[in-house]
Image (cartoon, rainbow, N blue to C red):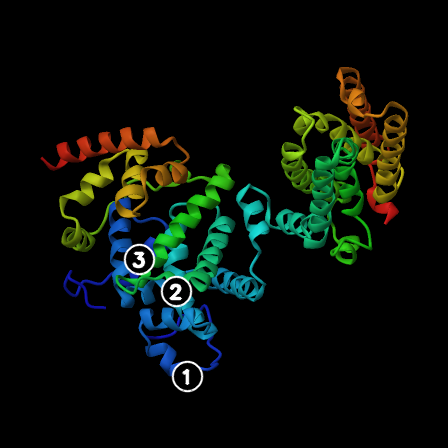
Amino acid sequence: MSSTFSEWHADDRLIERYAAGVLDPATAASVEAHVLRCRACRTTVAGHAPAARLALAWSAVTERIDDPSPGLVERSLRRLGLTESDARLAACAPAMRLAWLAALVAVLLFCVVAAAQGDVGPNLFMVLAPALPSIGVGLAYGPWTDGTYEVGRAAPYSAVRLLFLRTAVVLAVTFVLSGAAGLVVPGHRNGVVLWLIPAIALVTGTLALSAWLPPAWAASVTGGTWLAAVVAYWKSQGSVDPIFGPAGQVAAGVVFLVACLAIDRARRVHAYDVRRFL
Amino acid sequence: MPASPAVSFPAADLMETDVDAASDAALLEATAAGERVALEQLYARHAPWLLLRLQRRCADPALVDEVVQDTFVAVWRGARSYSGTGEVAAWIWGIGVRRLVDALRRRPAAALDLAAVPEVALESAEERVLLGIEYGDLGSALNHLSPELRAVVQATVLDGLTTREAGRLLGIPSGTVKTRMMRARAALRQELA
């Protein structure tokens, strides 16, 4: 409208050349500076803008403002560099659901409280902490717990990618919570980290088995085997600590490597089609 | 103001004529209150120049369209944060150019193609006079800068970006932005002396 720079207005031909991108930089900058302050010239500019593209962008804007705004988790994941769809999928993973988190916290709290009563607590923690991530991975997929199950079946989205994405979320959540619990469980100076390699080995094993079994079953197999074996050891020896010694850690590392090889082979041999179990 | 051909205005709570006559600041206030028509009118007024201006800074039309979208979604969600002083257009540009910087950071391959910046075109006598009103000899001095130096001047001085943001927009480290700005200043000083 009125500007301190008199009644100067960019004429139609100048704007046309600006819109076409053939104006020299200084004049273009001059037009841009003027357009910010002049409604009349903005109208002239509008006449030379690609109307179809603008209409398309507007319908996209209305679509997006009709959408519920993404939650805190989804926005943080977006900030970490995930695409919009990945962030949405990860954020609605059961690991992010309050009930699941509450159950996880309850289990860990139980261990911490029991730890104060004697040596059952520390042992229990070391039995459960490595198994929790695999159980989470098993639950992250399937009709009972996955809120996006129906949508996911029809979506043109790699089922393996979804499985791995959910696994990453579950790992992040359980590692933080179990790590925090490990800090307060007495009796294990290294309790915070000793369960990490076994936990990773169990999760990788679950992913590898998911090539042949539904993820929930795969998690039951790995988690069940672990719990049965470790509890049996605990009963006979009175403590699970030796399992987490150097030999145990190396064994867990071997399991991890074998599982990685199995996943790689499964991907190459039969495309690792997780979806066929759903 | 004649309506832009890009968008039609379905009248909701506000009458079409009210929306047409409303000032940008009033429209922004209505947008903050959740009036969809107000945002639509702001879009009709400001999206065209925003798109063209962004287009001069990014060679990828799909990315530009996305940034225009992002900007108006941000206007819808953040209309309340407008201080109430200053040009609404300048406020929108501030959002838009930063969205462009963010988008380019996620997809650095699409950064400004310096080769696509047109070389100095001969302007008519009329344009030379028009140019003289706003920039004087600075205009021709600016045109004589190398594309690399000019891009830095444009991003920092004219687009109002910080050194870091300008670096992201142009795909160069911020240290390089600083040295190029120094060289541009020296060149302009010499040209204008």
Determine the CA span between mark 2 and mark 1: 22 Å
- Residue positioned 63% across, 36% down in the render: A180
Q: Are marks 2 and 3 on the same chain?
A: yes
The residue that appears at 37% across and 67% down in the rendered structure is B45
| Vertical order, B122 against B23 (above or below) | above
Give residue A94's mark.
Answer: none
Residue denoted by label 2:
B80
Residue depicted at x 84% and y 44%: A216
Q: Quadrant of the C terminus of chain B?
A: top left
The residue type indicated by label 2 comes to Arg
Chain at tag 2: B
Q: Is residue B25 visible?
A: yes
Indicate the chain on which mark 1 is placed: B
Mark in front: 2 vs 3: 2
Q: What residue did someone put label 3 on? A: B90
CB under 8 Å between callouts 2 and 1? no
Mark 3 closeness class: few <14, some 14–19, many ≥20 residues within 10 Å: some
Q: Residue furthest front?
A: A117
User: Residue A138: x and y, percent?
Assistant: 80, 43
Q: Earlier in the sequence, mark 2 or mark 1?
A: 1
> Percent position (x, y) of residue A92?
68, 53
Residue receiving disc 1: B15
